[in-house]
Image (cartoon, rainbow, N blue to C red):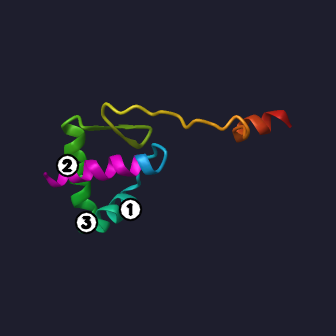
Amino acid sequence: MTRRDEILEVLIDFAKDHKGNSPSQNDLLMEMRKIGYTMSRGTLQVHLLKLLAEGRIYRKDGKLIITGSDWIPPEYDAEIPPIFLLESAI
């Protein structure tokens, strides 16, 4: 597994743990440190640019998106309506 593969895995895991949100570069650097990799912001940027060039990720509105991924909205409990419904009822 290459370093880029590991960065991609961290991106995927972060998105799963944060309801589809992508990490900031600082978040990504911290997550990489947790698995034993310390790198500079510049090195991370080079790897991200290579992942972009390979088509494995893309940017949309400043966010990193994993190519081929789908966002599945969370299911809401019928007993507890989403906040936007509560605000519209006021």
Judging by the rendered image, the residue that carries numbered circle 3 is: 40
Instruction: Please tell me which residue is depicted at 25% across the width and 53% down the height of the picture.
Output: 7
Asked if residue 9 is among those painted magenta in the image, a careful observer would answer yes
| Marks 3/2: CA–CA distance | 17 Å
Judging by the rendered image, the residue that carries numbered circle 1 is: 26
Q: Amino acid at mark 1?
A: Asn
Percent of width and height locating residue 24: 41, 55
Percent of width and height locating residue 13: 36, 50
Crowd tier of the residue under label 1, counting other residues whose Cα lies within 10 Å: few below 14, some 14–19, many 20 or above:
few
Q: Is residue 34 visible?
A: yes
In this picture, which residue range is highlighted in magenta?
Answer: 1-15
Q: Is residue 22 visible?
A: no
Badge 3 element: loop
Asked if residue 73 is among those painted magenta in the image, a careful observer would answer no
**Which is nearer the N-term, disc 1 or disc 3?**
1
Crowd tier of the residue under label 3, counting other residues whose Cα lies within 10 Å: few below 14, some 14–19, many 20 or above:
few
Q: Nearer the viewer, mark 3 or mark 2?
A: 2
Instruction: Please tell me which residue is depicted at 13% across the width and 51% down the height of the picture.
Output: 1
Badge 1 element: helix
